[in-house]
Amino acid sequence: IRSALMTTAYSSDSRGETMLDESTGNTSSVMDFGAGYVNPQKAMSPGLVYDLDAYDYVDFLCNSNYTAKNIQAVTRRPADCGAARRRAGHVGNLNYPSMAAVFQLYGKRKMSTHFIRRVTNVGSPRSVYRVRVNPPAGTTVTVEPETLAFRRVGQKLNFLVRVQVTALKLSPGNSVVKSGSIVWSDGKHSVSSPVVVTQQQPL
């Protein structure tokens, strides 16, 4: 349900312009509206969903530096954090319908990260989705593969998102947030996920 609500949400008004923040009168940003405003009708037929199961959350906890003992206290079963780190790699790989990268500026000119996502087909049995990338300003975003071909309902396919930035010159303690999106479309459904990139200059 969460995935369907997020990936079919909208952030533009009836004129196609970004909505305003009522409290300030300024143009709203992804930090105000998140994935967007809920569209209940479209959420009933999302096309693709980002599923999460208990194992995904265990992987997330392992990559958040919880120990296997900590996790077992909650799950009541052994946790193999070594395998979890090999599968997920980092906390950003929780199979969530959004992606957020935070880059600490430590003198590197170019920085990059990646996200692995898994989508499940809940639309037509045979459907082909192609990706459209709207990268955050000053950011290079690539998606592999660029096409997902499903043969049945319930089929799951993975894709990889790479994000690369060129370091900004910021004063100590300052940060800059830029947002974009990736959108999978089969001509009927548009499955949108926010991509948010933050650059921070440590104190």
Image (cartoon, rainbow, N blue to C red):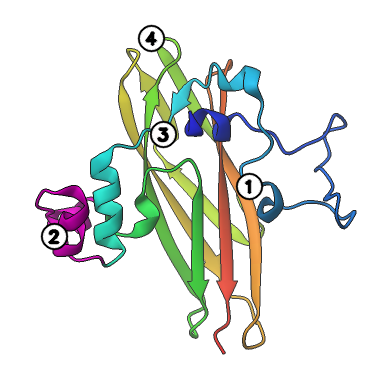
- Amino acid residing under circle 1: Gly
Mark 2, residue position: 82
Estimate the spatial distance between the alpha carbons at disc 2 and disc 4, rounded to whole Å. 36 Å
Per the image, the residue denoted by label 3 is 50
- Pointer 2 and pointer 3: residues touching (CB < 8 Å)? no
Part of the protein shown in magenta: 66-87
Discs 2, 4 touching: Cβ within 8 Å: no
Q: Is the Cβ of the residue at disc 3 closer than 8 Å to that at disc 1?
A: no
N-terminal label among 2 and 1: 1
Furthest residue toward left: 78
**What residue appears at the point 25 percent right and 65 percent down from the top-left corner?**
66
Q: Nearer the viewer, mark 4 or mark 3?
A: 3
Give the Cα separation between the discs numbered 3 and 1.
17 Å
Image quadrant in which you'd find residue 37 = top right
Label 4 and label 3: CA atoms lie apart by 17 Å
Q: Secondary structure at mark 4?
A: loop
| In this view, the mark in front (2 or 4) | 2
Q: In the rendered image, which quarter contains the C terminus?
A: bottom right
How far is the residue under mark 4 from the one under mark 1? Answer: 30 Å
First-in-chain label (4 vs 3):
3
Find residue 172 and report its horizontal and vertical position in percent: 62, 88
Displayed quadrant of residue 35: top right
Q: Secondary structure at mark 2?
A: helix
Residue at (31%, 63%) from the top-left corner?
A: 64
**What residue does disc 4 label?**
125
For the residue labelled by badge 3, is the local secondary structure a helix, a strand or a loop?
Answer: loop
